[in-house]
Image (cartoon, rainbow, N blue to C red):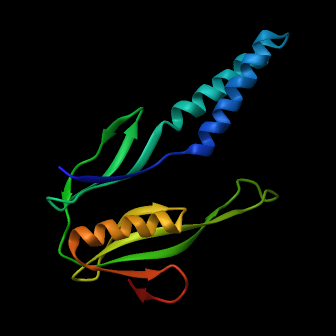
């Protein structure tokens, strides 16, 4: 079985949790053991909560796909056959994270979404990435499997690839 797998791993969150764990080791070896235990609990909690990865896997031979959920290396997800698809679309979206307090800044970021459009124009969101290059690579693999075109809408104007 020839499969193509794309998994998004929360790299930054894992670095932050490692910093918390390292800081707790330093605090536990010194005088502030209570603060060290709290820091260790926060670090381990972040590490466990960020052990879940998401992505997509494509079976190129049988034309199946599945949305992946991986926890500590164990992969979950049900295989589904690709519906009769006209084209794959990649577009840029702006995401906004509202702050819980009025005086905190609002965070915005760009994301790239890969959709499969059925014959009746209903989209299925297959993949989402913060990287344009990665989103286009996923779309290219899917388009190669299905033998269809890609509509690139990432730069404001639509073009067929």
Identify the residue at horizontal 35%, vertical 70% (top origin): 140
Residue at 70% from the left image edge and 31% from the top image edge: 19
- Depth order, front residue of 6/28: 6
Residue 85 appears left or right of 99: left
Question: x, y percentage for residue 33?
Answer: 78, 12
> Vertical placement of 57 versus 120: above or below?
above
What is the x, y in percent for residue 51?
48, 36
* x then y, percent, for residue 126: 35, 63
Q: Position of residue 47 (x, y in %)?
A: 56, 32
- How many numbered marks are there? 0
Q: Is residue 49 left or right of residue 151?
A: right
Asked which quadrant contains residue 63, the reply is bottom left
User: In the figure, residue 42 lies in which quadrant?
Assistant: top right
Quadrant for the C terminus in the image = bottom left
Residue placed at 16% from the left, 59% from the top?
61
Please say if 114 is above or below 50.
below
Q: Quadrant of residue 123?
A: bottom left
Can you name the residue that lies furthest to the right here? 31
Relative to 135, 144 lies left or right? left
Q: Residue at x 20, y 57 (%)?
A: 80
Relative horizontal placement of residue 15, taking residue 113 as reference (left or right) = right
């Amino acid at each position: 079985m020839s499969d193509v797998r794309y998994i998004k791993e929360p790299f930054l969150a894992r670095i932050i949790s490692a910093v918390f764990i390292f800081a707790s080791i330093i605090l536990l070896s010194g005088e502030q053991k209570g603060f060290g235990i709290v820091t260790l609990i926060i670090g381990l909690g972040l590490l466990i909560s960020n052990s879940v990865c998401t992505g997509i896997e494509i079976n190129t031979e049988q034309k199946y796909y599945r949305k992946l959920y991986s926890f500590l290396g164990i992969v979950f997800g049900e295989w589904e056959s690709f519906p009769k698809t006209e084209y794959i679309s990649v577009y840029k979206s702006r995401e906004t994270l509202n702050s819980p307090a009025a005086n905190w800044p609002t965070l915005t970021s760009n994301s790239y979404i890969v959709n499969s459009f059925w014959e009746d124009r209903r989209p299925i969101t297959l993949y989402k990435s913060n990287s344009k290059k990665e989103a286009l690579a996923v779309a290219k693999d899917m388009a190669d499997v299905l033998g269809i075109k890609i509509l690139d809408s990432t730069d404001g104007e639509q073009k067929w690839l």
